Image (tube, rainbow, N blue to C red):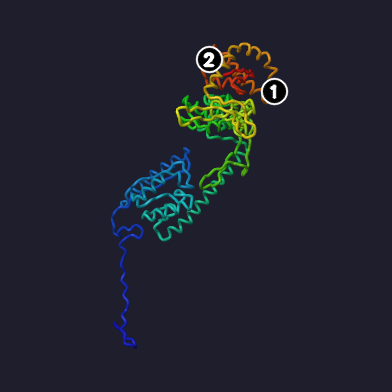
């Protein structure tokens, strides 16, 4: 019916016509589309302990049957992670592969048990879900009954993710407290699968693995001979000995960590590192931020404490100061300048030509003031002088051994108590090797160099003095 106003206008009653939606708001699929949704599930257990294995398998079986039981769903896969924390998604291969497949358009819906199974990090959780939502992929969390395409889904998800994150923080703090309590009680634990020389005993403490302990003793012995961690790593790799982690190649860092680990002398320093952030699991070397605990005589030693302490002293000498004893090359830290007492270092001459050679000279030869007068020596000259000195030494070895046996007890008694045992073992190894040698040598032998020579002092090319490990000094000339 038309109504005439005072001004004579006609007014018509409104008629609102509803036009039904034909596409899903987030999926863009037709509302009456009968196409099955491609559905995947995500399962995770946070530890790799045996008791969790059944939980993991149960989740996989459950979701496989659950998805296949729906006529309107098409089963894609169950993505899973075992023994992985939920605090962040960086190391969760199954989770990351699932998200990648979803973004490539292979998944329409992801089902998981709960928000905490998906992620305990609020930022990770929301970022991932929003990214999936932009690609028209929905998530469903069974325990909380949250569908991410629902109007209230994101609000509920934010609340639940925050709660999950706080739960993770609480768990982390409880674990940290428990670990520090064990440290305070002096309870020692190491990653036995990657720790060379010890197995886990029945009481959980360290028990020597003799086969592996021999490798540890060899490492300490080679170092005390004068070899660098790099040279030791190279030798172990060449001999086909597997590293603590089971790898074929050793690194100098691995060797140095063995040389500096107090557990090999029977003690244990606890809480060397601590966790900075429970979400990222980032660790930091403890420099006094949290308490440390030192347990003496906790287990049987592989390396005698005096020998261990001597190794630490040698490491300190090689790593600091003007006259530090480098061990990068065979002759590093072994040749002294007779003029100023500094160590010789290597220099490369004619590095880009066929005349390239390595020479050794005083490291402080040109450090201002009066220059050192000692000459440089190339490596072939050093090797030739070594052969001369060793052959002289071998000709006199019987007299050297006899004289040493007469005075050895007096010699050791004059040394400080803490140095006696280390020096005794060092010289006993030296004499045992010397007694086995017969005849003369024709060329340079690296093993003999390390086992016989303490250091070399260069005054000039006609006066080069080799000091052997028993104290014998032999002068040779070029």
Q: Which quadrant does the C terminus fall into? A: top right
Label 2's element?
loop
Look at the image and tell me whether residue 346 can be seen: yes
In this rendering, the answer to whether 44 lies above or below 153 is above
Q: Which mark is residue 415?
A: 1
| Residue in the foreground of this view, choosing between 173 and 269 | 269
Residue 123 at what x, y percent from top left?
A: 47, 53
Q: Tally the numbered discs.
A: 2
The spot of residue 337 in percent (x, y) is 62, 26
Q: Residues within 10 Å of mark 1 (few under 14, many from 20)?
A: few
In the rendered image, the vertical position of residue 279 relative to residue 255, given as above or below: below
Give the structural element (helix, strand or loop) at label 1.
Answer: loop
Residue 5 location, quadrant? bottom left
Q: Is residue 436 above or below residue 206?
A: above
Residue 151 image-quadrant placement: bottom left
In the image, residue 212 above or below residue 158 = above
Residue named by callout 2: 441
Please report contact status of discs 2 and 1: CB closer than 8 Å, yes or no. Answer: no
Categorize mark 2 by other alpha carbons within 10 Å: few (<14), some (14-19), many (20+): some
- Quadrant, the N terminus: bottom left
| Residue 207 placement (x, y as % from top left) | 56, 28
Question: Where's residue 19, x and y in %?
Answer: 30, 67
**Could you say which disc has been placed on residue 467 in the image?**
none
């Amino acid at each position: 019916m038309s109504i005439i106003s005072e001004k004579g206008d006609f007014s018509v009653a409104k008629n609102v016509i509803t036009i039904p939606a034909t596409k899903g708001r987030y999926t863009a699929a037709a509302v009456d589309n009968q196409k099955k949704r491609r559905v995947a599930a995500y399962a995770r257990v946070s530890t790799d302990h045996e008791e969790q294995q059944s939980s993991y398998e149960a989740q996989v079986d459950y979701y496989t049957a659950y998805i296949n039981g729906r006529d309107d769903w098409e089963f894609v896969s169950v993505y899973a992670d075992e023994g992985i924390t939920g605090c962040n998604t960086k190391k969760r291969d199954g989770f990351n592969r699932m998200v990648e497949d979803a973004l490539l358009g292979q998944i329409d819906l992801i089902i998981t048990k709960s928000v905490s199974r998906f992620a305990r990090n609020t930022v990770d959780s929301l970022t991932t879900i929003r990214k999936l939502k932009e690609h028209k992929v929905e998530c469903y969390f069974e325990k909380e009954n949250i569908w991410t395409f629902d109007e209230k889904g994101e609000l509920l998800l934010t609340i639940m993710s925050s709660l999950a994150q706080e739960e993770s923080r609480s768990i982390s703090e409880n674990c940290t407290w428990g670990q520090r309590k064990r440290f305070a009680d002096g309870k020692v634990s190491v990653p036995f699968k990657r720790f060379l020389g010890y197995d886990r005993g029945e009481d959980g403490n360290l028990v020597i693995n003799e086969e592996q302990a021999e490798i540890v003793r060899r490492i300490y012995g080679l170092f005390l001979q004068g070899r660098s961690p790099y040279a030791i790593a190279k030798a172990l790799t060449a001999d086909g000995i597997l590293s603590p982690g089971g790898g074929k190649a050793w690194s100098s860092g691995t060797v140095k960590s063995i040389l500096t680990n107090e557990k090999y002398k029977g003690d244990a320093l606890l809480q060397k590192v601590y966790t900075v952030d429970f979400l990222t699991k980032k660790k930091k070397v403890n420099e006094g931020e949290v308490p440390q605990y030192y347990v003496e005589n906790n287990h049987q030693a592989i390396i005698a404490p005096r020998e261990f302490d001597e190794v630490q002293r040698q490491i300190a000498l090689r790593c600091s100061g003007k006259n530090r004893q480098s061990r990068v090359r065979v002759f590093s830290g072994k040749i002294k300048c007779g003029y100023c007492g500094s160590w010789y270092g290597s220099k490369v001459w004619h590095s880009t030509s066929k005349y390239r050679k390595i020479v050794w000279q005083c490291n402080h030869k040109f450090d201002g003031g009066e220059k050192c007068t000692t000459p440089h020596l190339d490596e072939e000259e050093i090797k030739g002088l070594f052969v001369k000195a060793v052959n002289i030494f071998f000709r006199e070895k019987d007299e050297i051994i006899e004289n040493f046996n007469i005075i050895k007890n007096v010699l050791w008694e004059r040394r400080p108590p803490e140095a006696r045992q280390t020096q005794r073992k060092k010289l006993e190894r030296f004499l045992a090797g010397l007694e086995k040698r017969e005849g003369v040598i024709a060329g340079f032998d690296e093993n003999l160099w390390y086992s016989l020579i303490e250091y070399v002092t260069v005054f000039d090319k006609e006066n080069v003095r080799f000091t052997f490990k028993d104290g014998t000094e032999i002068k040779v000339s070029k």
